[in-house]
Image (tube, helix red, strand yellow):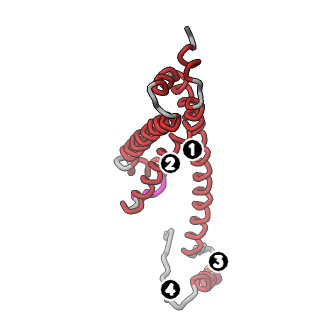
Amino acid sequence: MISAVLAKVEPAASPSLTAYRIRRENEDVDVLVSQGIFSSLTATLSGLVSYIHIFSAALWILAVVVLAAVFSLSIHERKKEFALLRILGATRRKLIAVVLGESSLAGLAGGAAGIVLASLAVFPFSTLISGRLELPYLDAPFFQIIPLAAGSLFLSVLAGPLASLYGALRISGAETYFTMREGE
């Protein structure tokens, strides 16, 4: 019993016309035109990629909100430190620069750690992942992975200052005297 036959057509011949002729002459035969298979697979995967982009954007926004809460608490706990810096002569702009610089470094460290951990999970176990998903896994070329990693790192570095901007503006505008006297 034959399960599949590959028919090679001349470059000038129409694959759909050849499929029609095979169907007409053989009633019990299903004919699949390779372009049709690939176009339906491409359409399905492009829809999936759209959902992945939407889900990724939602997760990034959620991460910025969570980071904003964390940075706000951190800045609140360190408000006496910032008041002392103001007493020692730091300008409001300098305080904002300190907070945004720290959050940028935190984003850089987190993004780099995430890229390294993701690489350690995906690349060595690509065969296992492919087997579990029951889909073929093709490694992307190195020149395509680098821009993706750079973009991920950029978004990580951007998330830090964006999340801490509100807290930085609040602490730079706080009255130094009242901040130092608080809790006495």
Classify the position of the C terminus by image quarter: top right
Q: Which residue is mark 2?
A: 155
Q: Is residue 73 left or right of residue 81?
A: right
Above or below for 22 versus 92 = below
Task: Give x and y (percent) for residue 154.
Answer: 47, 50
Which residue is more in the foreground, 78 or 50?
A: 78
Mark 2 falls on what kind of element? Answer: helix
Specify the segment rendered in magenta. 133-139
Mark 1 falls on what kind of element? Answer: helix
Which residue is more in the foreground, 44 or 55?
A: 55
Of circles 2 and 1, which is in front? 2
Q: Which residue is mark 4?
A: 9
Task: Give x and y (percent) for residue 112.
Answer: 39, 44
Q: CA distance from mark 4 to mark 3?
A: 20 Å
Q: Point out the residue furthest to the left here.
A: 124
Q: Amino acid at mark 3?
A: Glu
Mark earlier in primary sequence (4, 3): 4
Query: Magenta includes 135?
Result: yes
Task: Give x and y (percent) for residue 75.
Answer: 53, 27
Q: Which residue is mark 1?
A: 60
Which residue is more in the foreground, 146 or 29?
A: 146
Residue 103, label in figure: none
Q: Are marks 2 and 1 in contact (CB under 8 Å)?
A: yes
Question: Badge 4: how crowded within 10 Å, few (<14), some, or many (20+)?
Answer: few
Of circles 1 and 3, which is in front? 1
At 46% from the left and 47% from the top, the residue drawn is 132
Q: Amino acid at mark 4?
A: Val
